[in-house]
Amino acid sequence: MGRPGRQAGGACLMSHRGRFPSAAVGEHWCSTADRRTVFRGPVLAKFEVTMTEPVTSGEPQRILHAIAPNAMGGAERVVHDSAVGQQDRGQSVGVLALLDPDGPDPWLVTALRSRRISTYTCRATLRGYFTEIKAIRHWVRQMRPDVVHCHAYRADVLGRLALKGLPPAMVATAHGFTGGGLKNRCYEWLDRRTLRRFDSVIAVSAQLESRLRRSGVSGERVRLVQNAFLPLPLVSRAEARAKLGLEQAGAAVGWIGRVEPEKGPDLFVQALSRLQQRGVQAAVIGDGRERGSVELAVRELGLEDRVRMTGAIPNAGELLSAFDVVVLSSRTEGLPISLLEAMSAAIPVVATAVGDVPAATANGKFVQLVPSEDPGALAAAIDRTLADGARAVAVARQASDWVRAQFGSEAWLDRIDETYRWAMRQRARR
């Protein structure tokens, strides 16, 4: 059993590990400051909790976010940016991450710890849902939040079960429904049914808002809160290209996202093979289930010498300066943060007209919009943007000013807080 240790600045680092046989009775020690408690109960999977807890500000509103994070993605950025912004406002914030049994901590966990945000992790064996429910209930009882804010279907479903009979208001953010295979569609169907029982549900796009209403989430509980972003500092063009393995000379096109079917990385690679402008190099930044098939497509199309598959890179937005054009080739979207980051960085963008992408770009005033599922149209738009040169850069600078005014973090955090207050009022009436 781990023992509490001290970090600089008065924070207390506690690591708790235990292995319990199936249906055995286990003990889990929790220590905060000088108080130590223990709870006993059946544990059906390996259970690991790590907490980093800074000194709180005394702000009465306490928020616990819950998510099963991927390596890197839009939902993870939303959780990170909202937690950072809320803590900077003096609110007491914690984040519970439901993790796979093995492997390193994902970007979200390490990034939150670097900002001294209370971070709780639960590592359960495959389908150790009972353990994850116990972990959520435990940290809710320890932290006593006013609001538990869940993100994506695993946290939504398990969080709703865990909070039964507990007082916090329940809020969820619907980041998007991607469809795909039968298993994923079943998970998303269950998620939409579960969201009916939350006090409030945030939709990140108008399309998602409409879909949630059609799914039976009562209209008054659905709140449209479009994503915002915290601008990342850009490294120099030369440094960014060196980190990505790109040549310093010549045009470069970038793609950032999860390498999953809904994000269309295959469409991006097909578009690269159809470019009229020769010698254009590219980087695909991200990871996911489709990486192997995308790498195979790169080889089959003879693009190995021009395309770099970098894998996931933390804070990839800092490397946007490497590119002359950024491409979003998604088949479906809510409101992608990678789009907002690219526009904020004043990089010309080519994007598919899906989700709230048209609305976020003033219906194509600031980016080149093309239909989804059309690599030929993507290639033509990339060629036009590269050929436009100075004009494309001038439009991108206008886009930077516009997106910073429209999607700044302060107004976004205000809307989230308003949603919390509404959910708390709803909870108090029950």
Image (tube, helix red, strand yellow):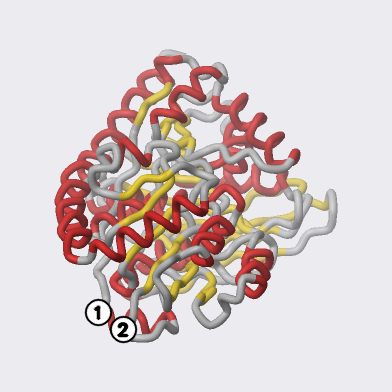
Q: Are marks 1 and 2 in contact (CB under 8 Å)?
A: yes
Q: How many marks?
A: 2
Q: Which mark is residue 239?
A: 2
| Callout 1: SS | loop
Quadrant the N terminus occupies: bottom right
| Amino acid type at mark 1 | Ser
For this rendering, which residue is in front, 109 or 12? 109
For this rendering, which residue is in front, 148 or 288? 288
| Callout 2: SS | helix
Query: Where on the picture, by quarter, is residue 267?
Result: bottom right
Q: Horizontal and vertical percent for residue 190? A: 66, 30
Q: Horizontal and vertical percent for residue 127? A: 75, 49
Query: Where on the picture, by quarter, is residue 281?
Result: bottom left
Instruction: Identify which residue is drawn at 45% across, 45% down.
Output: 65
Horizontal relation, residue 63 to residue 306: left or right = left
Q: Residues within 10 Å of mark 1 (few under 14, many from 20)?
A: some
Q: Which mark is residue 418?
A: none
Q: Is residue 316 visible?
A: yes
Query: Where on the picture, by quarter, is residue 47?
Result: bottom right
Q: Is residue 247 above or below residue 72?
A: below
Q: Is residue 31 visible?
A: no
For this rendering, which residue is in front, 32 or 88? 88
Q: Residues within 10 Å of mark 2 (few under 14, many from 20)?
A: some
Instruction: Identify which residue is drawn at 52% across, 53% down.
Output: 375
Q: Horizontal and vertical percent for residue 290? A: 65, 60
| Amino acid type at mark 2 | Glu
Could you give the CA–CA distance between mark 1 and mark 2, rounded to whole angstroms?
Answer: 5 Å
Instruction: Identify which residue is drawn at 45% across, 65% down.
Output: 275
Instruction: Identify which residue is drawn at 37% across, 54% down.
Output: 381
Q: Horizontal and vertical percent for residue 60? A: 29, 39
Q: Which mark is residue 236?
A: 1
